[in-house]
Image (cartoon, grey):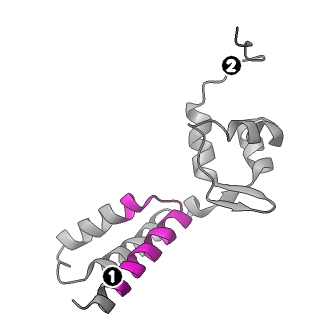
Amino acid sequence: MSNENLSHSHAMLNAARRVAVALGYDDSEAARLAHELEQEGREDWNTTDLLLLALAELAKREPERRDLVGAVEAGEILGVTRQRVQQLAQRPDFPKPRYELAAGKLWARADIIAFDKRWDRRAGRPRKAQ
C-alpha cells in the first residue's frame, strides 16, 4: 500500500472513531463490531469500510444513545439542580460530555440515566476534611 493510501486510510479510521464517539460509543465498541462483521464473511473488506459499516449498524441498533441532554435536563433526570450537575461533572465517575459548547456541556441521556442508577447518593452536606 502506498504512503498516500496509508495516510488516507489512517485519516478515515480517525474520522470513523470520532463519529463513534459522537454517536455515543467508544471506538472499541465500533472496532469490536467491525471485527465481528469481518468474521461473518467480510474479510475481503478493508478496515475502514468495516468500521464505517459497524458505525451504521450501531446507529441503527440504539438510536436513543444519540439523545443529548444539557445540565438542566440532566438535573431533571438526577433530581438535582443544574448547578449540582456541574459539581457532579467534576467527579471521575460522572459521564464524559459528548460535546462541550460555549452554551455548556451535552451528555448522552443514556449515560446520565446509567449514572443515576449507580450513583450512591448521600443526604446532606459532605463532612469537611479535618
Q: Which residue is mark 2?
A: 122
User: In the image, residue 47 lies at what x, y percent?
Assistant: 28, 77
Image location of residue 63, percent across then percent down: 54, 65
Left or right: 89, with 93 as reference point: right
Quadrant location of the N terminus in the rendered image: bottom left
Mark 1, Cα crowd under 10 Å, few <14 / some 14-19 / many 20+, is some
Residues 74 and 26: in front is: 26
Q: Is residue 43 above or below residue 126?
A: below
Q: Residue 105 — which label?
A: none
Q: Residue 121: which quarter of the image? A: top right
- Residue bearing the label numbered 1: 49
Magenta residue check for 2: no
The magenta region covers 7-30
In the depicted structure, whether residue 118 falls above or below residue 113 = above
Q: Residue at x 74, y 13 (%)?
A: 128
Name the magenta segment's main secondary structure.
helix
